[in-house]
Amino acid sequence: MKTQTLPRDDSGKLITYAWPGGYPVYYVTADGGTLCPDCAQQAEADGLTTDKDDAQWYIVAADVNYEDDNLACDGCGEHIESAYGEDED
């Protein structure tokens, strides 16, 4: 499975928001799971993201959540913010 270079900020951390635009970013694992930026960063710090045989933590891509109101992190279960899909009350 080919991986892309993951987007990082100037300090080398995985980004939380894409620039330009400030769109919320999430990370995709080899098994098709999703991780919020905090869980992706923690998994990387714990050395879990380098094992290609552990598909639930091996990050293969980053993407922007444009409209999925129901996207949740498979690591912590928290809602992953969307750029346009959520209703503002």
Image (cartoon, grey):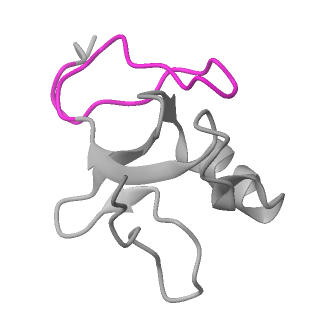
Q: In this view, does 51 lie to the left or right of 71?
A: right
Left or right of 20? Residue 13 is right
Q: Which residue is drawn at 66% across and 61% down?
A: 50
Residue 55 lies in quadrant: top right
Majority secondary structure in the magenta region: loop
Above-or-below relation of 10 to 54: below
Residue 25 rendering spot, x and y as whole percentages: 36, 48
**Residue 16 highlighted magenta (yes or no):** no
The residue shown at (75%, 52%) is: 48
Q: In which quarter of the image is residue 54?
A: top right
Query: In this picture, is 39 found above or below 34?
Result: below
Q: State the residue lying farthest toward the right.
A: 46
Q: Where, by quadrant of the figure, is residue 27 drawn?
A: top left
Q: In the image, which residues are magenta?
A: 66-85
Comparing 81 with 72, the one in front is 72
- The residue furthest bottom is 10
Q: How many marks?
A: 0
Residue 76 position within the rendered picture, expressed as x and y whole percent measured from the top left: 70, 25
- Please tell me whether residue 14 is drawn above or below residue 31 in the rendered image: below
Residue 75: within the magenta? Answer: yes
Q: Residue at x 39, y 19 (%)?
A: 71
- Residue 19: image location, x then y, percent: 24, 69
Q: In which quarter of the image is the C terminus?
A: top left
- Residue beneath the point at 27% across and 58% down: 22
